[in-house]
Amino acid sequence: ETGVTQSPTHLIKTRGQQVTLRCSSQSGHNTVSWYQQALGQGPQFIFQYYREEENGRGNFPPRFSGLQFPNYSSELNVNALELDDSALYLCASSRDRPYNEQFFGPGTRLTVL
Amino acid sequence: KQEVTQIPAALSVPEGENLVLNCSFTDSAIYNLQWFRQDPGKGLTSLLLIQSSQREQTSGRLNASLDKSSGRSTLYIAASQPGDSATYLCAGGYNNNDMRFGAGTRLTVKP
């Protein structure tokens, strides 16, 4: 059984640029959630996708957007990057809703200069 | 407001000691509570998931309890080993599909 994978591992961007992060869910999982983790803090919920529809969103501005594809993989897009967007971005997959156990990928480390 | 707090922020113990990590949450309407382990710069590894209808879960040397009425969960680690050194995070799952994380407890187990 393949676990959750994310790409790229690391990314460096400059302010104002746009970035796309990718996540492949674990086999059999149809729900993907995205989180932002700043250094020394716990992850913060960005949004969740369930069967290709956004199914909940945290306190993040509209420049954070996403997609889920028919194979349940997902993308996180961030427009107009700001310095504070520098963080570890984590995705997690689960069966059906998030009430079941969430399994996390290794994360993408984004640095905005 | 759904806040999760973990105390202590850091803990250092000698190898072989039993220890308890604490997690408290302000909103008792959680659907589940999950404990994770995170190694530096890495993703999260799920340790235990407790559904709101359960009181505890066990896996090997780990035991997690949940008391919704008091808004508390504990993670008990028996016979700690240097390989247990990591940051331990708890997270409450809520019906708005949000998982609220604590800031974590950084555990160091000294040989």
Image: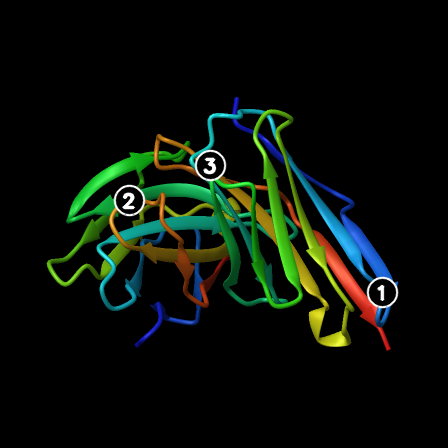
Tag 1 and tag 3 share a subunit: yes
Viewer-closest of A42 and B108: B108
Residue B52's disc number: 3
**Location of residue A8 in the rendering, given as x and y in whole percent from the top left corner:** 37, 71
Label 2's element?
loop
Residue beneath the point at 40% across and 54% down? A102
Quick one: label 1 or label 3, which is nearer the N terminus?
1
Pinpoint the chain carrying mark 3. B
Label 3's element?
loop
Q: CA gap, disc 2 to disc 3?
A: 15 Å
- Position of residue A90 in the picture relative to residue A37 (left or right): left
Tag 2 and tag 3 share a subunit: no
Q: Residues within 10 Å of mark 3 (few under 14, many from 20)?
A: some
Q: Amino acid at mark 2?
A: Arg
The residue tagged 1 is B17
Q: CA gap, disc 2 to disc 1?
A: 37 Å
In the picture, residue A59 is in which quadrant? top left
In the picture, residue A91 is in which quadrant? bottom left
